[in-house]
Image (cartoon, rainbow, N blue to C red):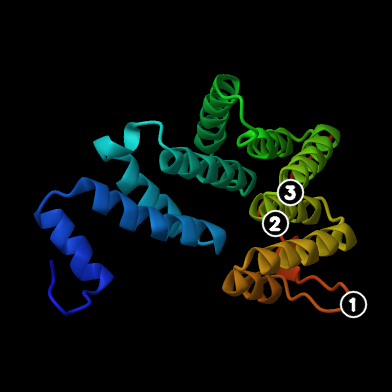
Amino acid sequence: VFGDIIPSENFILDDAKAKQNFVNIEMINLSHFFASFLFGDYQTANELYDTVSSLACHKQPTVWSIFSQYYRCIIAFHLYREGQGEEWLEEGEKILQKFEHFAKQTTTNFFDSKLLLLRAEYYASSCEIVNAKVAFDASIQSARDNGFINDQGLAYECVGKFLASIVDNKAASQCFMIAHMCYTQWGALALAEHIWEKYKLNTCGGVSQFATSNKHERNWE
């Protein structure tokens, strides 16, 4: 299509917009959304999600639309716990209900660890410490049993953030270390390095103040 010239991504995106190639528009924005989420840039991720979710082709229950909702749900619960408004809890609950439905409609183990992780995030947002810990552990175990090393890494990172928020810093640091190892094993070396630097990990199990900070104190049960 472009001859011997390798076009830039921006050129491809502009070309897709000009030709109203909505599938290409969706895939390019989704790739940036996934990267923004994994690297913790939730503001950019949300902007990209809003762009993608407005496309008619994204409203179909494809694996890509399901993954985008999965990540959006985690973002929603996180932003709620950061004091960004009740509407984020409501959105998280709405997407969680969709995942409950998806899980009932499939006979595969694809949704198991993901659904458990979303439940854990919901419990964490509802100040239910015991239920959150149980669900986080179950999500990690399910991801491990089913060989989803990327899901295992994400679950460890999420539980690390949760433990840091209740000032269990030693356990949080251990979870971040394991998340780093999971991402490394997955082959996502840039992400693994990001985790190492973000939480200021070291061989002694240290964790940064960033990981333990909370914008709003919450009363946990």
Between marks 2 and 1, how big is the CA–CA gap?
20 Å
* Residue 57: x %, y % from top left: 27, 37
- Identify the element where label 3 is drawn: loop
**The label number, if any, that marks residue 218 in the structure image:** none
Q: Residues within 10 Å of mark 1 (few under 14, many from 20)?
A: few
Query: Residue, x 80% and y 43% (percent of image)?
Result: 141
Mark 2 in CB contact with mark 3 (< 8 angstroms): no
Query: Residue, x 72% and y 70% (percent of image)?
Result: 199
* Residue 65: x %, y % from top left: 42, 39
Mark nearest the camera among 2 and 1 is: 2
Residue where numbered disc 1 is placed: 204
| Residue 56, quarter of the rendered image | top left
Mark 3 in CB contact with mark 1 (< 8 angstroms): no
| Residue 210, quarter of the rendered image | bottom right
User: Considering the image in quadrants, where does the C terminus appear?
Assistant: top right
- The amino acid type, in three-letter code, at marker 2 is Gly
User: Considering the image in quadrants, where does the N terminus appear?
Assistant: bottom left
Residue where numbered disc 3 is placed: 217
* Residue 207: x %, y % from top left: 80, 70
- The amino acid type, in three-letter code, at marker 1 is Cys
Tell me if residue 109 comes above or below residue 15 in the rendering.
Answer: above
Between marks 2 and 3, how big is the CA–CA gap?
26 Å
- Identify the element where label 2 is drawn: helix
Mark nearest the camera among 2 and 3 is: 2
Disc with the residue nearer the chain's start (2 vs 3): 2
- The amino acid type, in three-letter code, at marker 3 is Glu
Residue where numbered disc 2 is placed: 153
Between marks 3 and 1, how big is the CA–CA gap?
28 Å
